[in-house]
Amino acid sequence: MTSDGPAPPPDGERPAPGRARPWALEVGEQLRQVQRQLDTTTRKSEQTAGHVAEIADILARMSPRLDDVEHGVAALGGAVEAAAAGAGDAADEALSLTPALRWSQLDHADKHAAWDTLAGFVAEVLTNDYQLTRLELPDCWPVHPRAVRELAWLRTLYIASSGAGARPDLVAEWHVRWLPAAITNLAVAIDRRECAPGKHRLTEEERRQYDDAAQQAASAGQAPPALTDEGGAARPRYLPAQFPPLRGHDPSYGAAPDRPRLLDSETPPPPSRPEYWWEYFLDARLADIGEDTAST
């Protein structure tokens, strides 16, 4: 065999004219074998490239999840440290409540404490310290179960990030990540088409219809109609005295300037205050834990 393939047979061994030459067949077979090996190698290379791309995609999708796990572990560590720091202190017992995931499992006393500590967190931190507006923190948040859970887990993370010796990155996470996330989730939990300052589960059209009916009743010397025949904490509500002022022009109020006016798009939303949501809070707590003789 030469460098160019198998050598031809000696002159004395050539096949008779008209018969196939064995050395040519051998060359063809070898070429076909090389081609098959090349095809196999090409397929394996393509499969390997596909696997590499798939692995790269998986890693890209896992990266933010790993970041979430890292932040979650850090937050959990901070919560454990905060709980350990307050262990044995009766004054800090309420701070150890983390009812966002197990609210329904709390007994009567713990559930009452959970409501009260949550109200304290909303009033002292979100309302007083951070000055959330009535748009960011709707008045009716206590009667929306999902909103209550959102604020409960936000409070849990606040405790974890504000304990003695809390890591600076946990504090930063609460400011730049968890608080904005909770505000976003509140907007999902509470439909702004029905819930706004001074009203709950009442669209603007329904509110206008009620205003017209109430005005007609007043003109006829009759009592205003009932807003709804529903009962319970989540019933529709209309609290005209709690509407913020309207600075823009609203022609629907031209004939009755003393009627409550809604916040328009040109007016910055006013800050939330406990008196705006306290009635909702008392009703929601009562509906959740039943009659209670404790002071409110």
Image (cartoon, grey):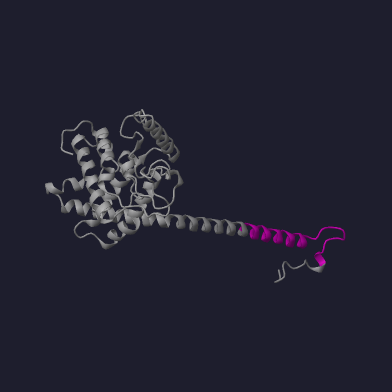
Res. 232 image quadrant: top left
Tell me, yes or no, if residue 97 can be seen here: no
Q: Is residue 246 above or below residue 21?
A: above
As rendered, which of 128 and 74 lies closer to the eye?
Answer: 128
**How many numbered discs?**
0
Question: Residue at point 30% right, 56% down?
Answer: 174
Extreme residue toward the right, this view:
17
User: Horizontal placement of 98 versus 263: left or right?
Assistant: left
Q: Position of residue 260 (x, y in %)?
A: 36, 43
Q: Is residue 142 above or below residue 63?
A: above
As rendered, which of 206 and 20 lies closer to the eye?
Answer: 206
Res. 164 image quadrant: bottom left
Question: Residue at point 82% right, 67% down?
Answer: 12
Q: Position of residue 2 (x, y in %)?
A: 71, 71
Quarter the N terminus occupies:
bottom right
Q: In the rendered structure, does residue 20 fall within the stretch colored magenta?
A: yes
Instruction: Give the residues drawn in magenta, as a range.
Output: 12-40
Question: Residue at point 62% right, 59% down?
Answer: 42
Q: Position of residue 15 (x, y in %)?
A: 83, 61
User: Horizontal placement of 236 versus 102: left or right?
Assistant: right
As rendered, which of 51 and 222 lies closer to the eye?
Answer: 222
Q: Is residue 171 above or below residue 236?
A: below
Q: Position of residue 155 (x, y in %)?
A: 26, 49
